[in-house]
Image (cartoon, rainbow, N blue to C red):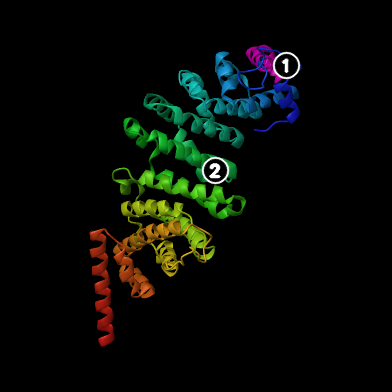
Amino acid sequence: MKTDPESKSEAETPGPVVTGDVIGDTAYSERFVLKILLKLANLDSLKDELNEKAFEDDICTLWDMTVERDVVLFLLKHKMLNLFNFALPTIETPRYIEIFVGIIGNMCCQKEAVNTLIKMDEFLYLLLDYIKTDDSLILIQLLRLVSSGLPSMDCEDIVIWLNMFDKVGYSDALYYILKNSSNKQLLVTALENLNTICSYCNIQMCRNQYFEHFVCKEVLTSLTTAFTELTITQKESLSKDELERIMVISLQMTLEMVSFEKPTEIFDDCNENIETIISTVLEYYEVKLVQEKEIDSDLVDLLDCINNIVGIVPISKECEPDKYFNTCYSMWKALKSITNVNQNGDSNFEEVDKEEFQEFVKNMKPSLSVLMCKYMQQCSQEHLFNVLDKIGNENKDILMSVTDVDIKVAVSNRIFDYTTRLNENLDS
């Protein structure tokens, strides 16, 4: 949140500098903050203050100030969360709710604030219940608040938050946002929020509770809808870093969700959603590698993630080769064609260290080979014949990179059947 520089200047230097007036090691004024706290404490006059532009400017300045740890500790010392607890229920203006929730979100970057908030059951419920609002700006700040707080919590605290998530129906509301919103910032923030929840709430102590509240068929449907809206419909509005971040966390969350026991019972109708995410990611990185000649070491980890997903969910049985086999083969061929790099490490690719480049190729080819073989192991006979016609004798090179004996034998047997039928047709 950025404010008018003049407003911020008043907060930093409200008149002559007075010894002892600054907050910690910052240049911010204690008096400036205390005046705001006094106004928040007086509920009788607060309604009038809310109509004043000057008060909104001061609150926005305070919002900016809360990125500083010393300011947060000062606010905690003066019971800022208690004041918000009393003030928020009386406030109906969405703009002020957004600002107050945003301030608390900044404060929750500090563990001390999270520890204080978690002891305020009714206030925590009030905050989390804003997940049901239709105001996108409030939602963005609430999602930030949750994402800021979870990383600093211990197991016992996470249990409390999961209970509160359940009481307010947090997951249903979050999945509704992902499935129905077209607001770019809200969708990006919601995806990051779900990723944070997956990362910090899926721990041994809370696994069953997390599973019951967050793992359901709706999660993959909602995730895929938001993913498609951002990476396809609104792709041009995203920066390269934003786009790749969305792809990375979407794959991670997909793997996280399908890794529970008996995932096919929950996600038996979600294969198409999983295919959409995987194919979109692979198509993007195929262009990056094959056409733009750019090496991205993250692709190795992404392929490992995709391999794990495909190993759990049998999407290969029905999907067409262009869902992921063809893109893998395209990248595999590109890597094969550029393995002979000269002594200076020069190639058609971006300038990279020779050893780094060779390490990339060394890691990529086996991952691509395994993914292609998993497809050939499970796909229909018609699709198998199509891909074998496409790759020809290169199936031998692909199989050589695979170390999993079961996959290797299964694919070899299917290739043998294909070759036998082909020879029989030629003889006839």
Q: How many marks?
A: 2
User: Which residue sits at x=52%, y=66%?
Assistant: 348
**The quarter of the displayed image where residue 135 is located:** top right
The spot of residue 339 in percent (x, y) is 42, 66
Looking at the image, is mark 1 or mark 2 earlier in the sequence? 1
Q: CA distance from mark 1 to mark 2?
A: 44 Å
Q: Is residue 24 above or below residue 393?
A: above
The kind of secondary structure the magenta stretch mainly shows is helix
Boundaries of the magenta span: 31-52
Q: Which x, y percent locates residue 319?
A: 38, 62
Q: Characterize the local packing of mark 2: few (<14), some (14-19) or many (20 or more) Cα atoms within 10 angstroms.
A: many
Instruction: State yes or no: residue 254 in magenta.
Output: no
**Amino acid marked by disc 1:** Val
Q: Are marks 1 and 2 in contact (CB under 8 Å)?
A: no
> Which residue corresponds to mark 1?
17
- Name the residue that disc number 2 marks: 187
Q: Residues within 10 Å of mark 1 (few under 14, many from 20)?
A: few
**Is residue 427 depicted above or below 132 in this figure?**
below
Residue 52 in view: no
Q: Amino acid at mark 2?
A: Leu
Tell me: 275 left or right of 74: left
Secondary structure at numbered mark 2 = helix
Left or right of 359, for residue 181: right
Of circles 1 and 2, the one toward us is 1
Please tell me which residue lies in front, 50 or 332.
332
